[in-house]
Image (spheres, grey):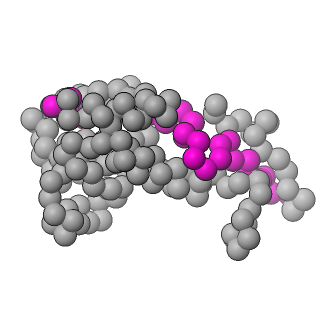
């Protein structure tokens, strides 16, 4: 359910708008638009099934061209992609995506070592690395990361102790 100022927010006594959190920790993110990009769709079957179990649906792309087309037609929140697609690979792929939309959360499925992955994608805003054939625990990790980011931008109406308001 999209947030609407009239029904999801309230005025704080200081005159500032206080946003209500539309979901609680552990709930799936509302209206999360996910694109899975790989030229080997069978590699993402378990990942997609785990996302579907959380009521999250995915669109599919096989090439960078298809990703860019999807980005023209849909406001994507999350891109989970194989590191190498037939028409573009690695860092160039991520550069192309973030030049078009720097706010998209990118997850790269790669068999690089953690150090090599960090060296390759440092400063690119890549959310995380998953194995080339991600599983259900990887889906849970992605959801958790995106949920944490979303909660930063959607403060709860009941702040935790120590939280800056």
Residue pictured at 13% horizontal, 43% vertical: 84
Q: Going by the image, does 118 lie left or right of 13?
A: left
Q: Position of residue 60 (x, y in %)?
A: 29, 27
The C terminus appears in which quarter of the rendering?
A: bottom right
User: Is residue 4 in the magenta section?
Assistant: no
The N terminus appears in which quarter of the rendering?
A: top right
Q: Going by the image, does 151 lie left or right of 72?
A: right
Query: Which residue extends farthest bottom?
Result: 162
User: Is residue 29 in the magenta section?
Assistant: yes
Judged by its main secondary structure, the magenta piece is loop
124 w.r.t. 23: above or below: below
Q: Position of residue 110 (x, y in %)?
A: 18, 51
Quarter residue 117 falls in: bottom left
Residue 142 visible, this angle: no
Q: Position of residue 145 (x, y in %)?
A: 45, 54
Between 44 and 151, the residue placed more toward the observer is 44
120 w.r.t. 1: above or below: below
Q: Going by the image, does 66 lie left or right of 78?
A: left
Residue pictured at 77% horizontal, 44% vertical: 9
Residue pictured at 16% horizontal, 63% vertical: 113
Query: Which residue extends farthest right?
Result: 13
Q: Which residues are magenta?
A: 15-41
6 w.r.t. 143: above or below: above
Between 28 and 22, the residue placed more toward the observer is 28
Q: Position of residue 127 (x, y in %)?
A: 36, 55
């Amino acid at each position: 359910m999209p947030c609407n100022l009239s029904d999801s927010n309230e005025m704080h006594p200081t005159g500032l708008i206080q946003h209500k959190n539309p979901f609680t920790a552990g709930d799936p993110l509302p209206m999360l638009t996910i694109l899975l990009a790989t030229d080997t769709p069978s590699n993402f079957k378990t990942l997609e099934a785990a996302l579907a179990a959380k009521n999250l649906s995915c669109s599919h792309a096989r090439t960078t061209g298809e990703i860019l087309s999807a980005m023209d037609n849909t406001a994507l929140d999350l891109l989970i992609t194989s590191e190498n697609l037939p028409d573009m690979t690695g860092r160039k792929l991520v550069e192309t995506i973030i030049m078009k939309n720097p706010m998209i959360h990118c997850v790269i499925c790669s068999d690089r070592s953690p150090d090599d992955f960090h060296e390759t994608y440092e400063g690119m805003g890549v959310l995380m690395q998953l194995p080339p054939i991600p599983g259900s625990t990887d889906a849970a990790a992605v959801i958790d990361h995106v949920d944490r980011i979303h909660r930063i931008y959607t403060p709860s109406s009941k702040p935790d102790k120590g939280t800056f308001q």
